[in-house]
Amino acid sequence: MVALKGPAIDRFLDRPDRMVVLVYGPDTGLVTERAGLLVKKHLRGDDMGRVVIDGDSLSGDPGKLVDEAHSVPMFGGRQAIRVTPTSKNIAPALAAILGQPPAETIVVFEAGDLKPSAPLRKMVEASDAAVALPCYVDDEAAVDRLITQEAEAAGLRVANEARSALRHLLGGDRLASRGELAKLATYCMGSETIELADVVAVCGDASALELDEITDAAFIGDVRSAEHGLHRALEAGVAPASIVGGLTRHLMQLMVARERIDGGATADAAMRELRPPVFFKRQPSFRRQLSLWSADALGRMLPHMSRAEADTRLRAEISTEIVSRLIMAVASVPSRR
């Protein structure tokens, strides 16, 4: 089935009617959130039926997934299988499960950003037994809805200036956005309205700003500043996976802008068309990055990002080392030009 969009995604999450689902996109937090919602909805509160399969393991054993999906749960009840992201080829495993789709077990594949030509997308979108759920970075309207939703759940109103500030700070990663809003709601407990001062106090120096510093330094080749920013972010409690996600989203923005420039647009015009837009304080650095990175160099870096995204989830014990190596790899590219 073709990829669902907009309200159709929410309807499917509420009442899934396919047992094989591909959840993919550049917003890794939203991918994680939607995959979790599908599993929770299917299991109806019974976590005994939750199964997680390392995506890497399926590349060498395509039949493993079919066997697991058609097995009878040890303690009865429903079963939900979640396949973690991988940079390896798991198309044969997907083909096998599409050929023998389970009737009672839901199988949820998580993936990063996939082009329309990617085998996983093509196979799922061509199958009546499966559905694809794209997870793109929240635009301004989606961020507004999220702010309203979380504030109303906490019994709070949001002042206009506070909302404007939150629009800039949020949107790159759905889970990170929810986390920031939850902290803000806790901070404002006992108040009626979230004010700008509250946003500055709770979010003004939070992960979004830390990630900007790391990302901009890495992509202009400033290793020392990037490593300093990484150290500060980790000390502040920013998860390595969030840092990798921020680097990946930034890379994708550079790729889009670079493609437009190579097509004849100016750097400023290319930046104006990006969604979410580049914050005005970051525009000089972003413009410089576009002059330092070619389309080929950006394309070659993408697999490194995908691998790091998967590794930080699967090997949490060395996730700090993984993100540090990735930053070094990114920062080394401008220095070679």
Image (cartoon, rainbow, N blue to C red):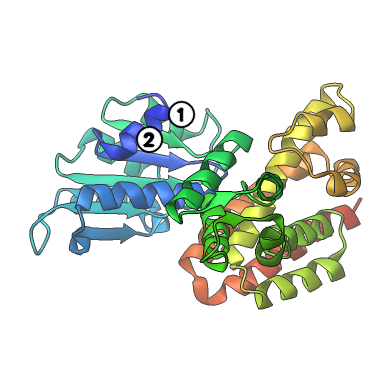
Occupied quadrant, residue 335: bottom right
| Contact check, label 1 and label 2, Cβ < 8 Å | yes
Task: Give the residue at the far left of this rendering.
Answer: 76
Find residue 104 and report its horizontal and vertical position in percent: 14, 44
Determine crowd level at label 2: few under 14, some 14-19, many 20+ residues with C-alpha closer than 10 A.
Answer: some
Mark 1 — residue? 6
Is residue 48 toward the left or the right of residue 86 in the image?
left
Give the amino acid at mark 1: Gly
What residue is at 66 percent from the left and 62 percent from the top?
198
Mark 2 — residue? 10
269, above or below 140, in the image: above
Q: Nearer the viewer, residue 48 or 333?
A: 48
238, above or below 84, in the image: below
Find residue 133 and report its horizontal and vertical position in percent: 42, 36
Callout 2 secondary element? helix
What residue is at 58 percent from the left and 42 percent from the top?
143
- CA separation in Å, label 1 and label 2: 7 Å
What residue is at 39 percent from the left and 39 percent from the top?
22
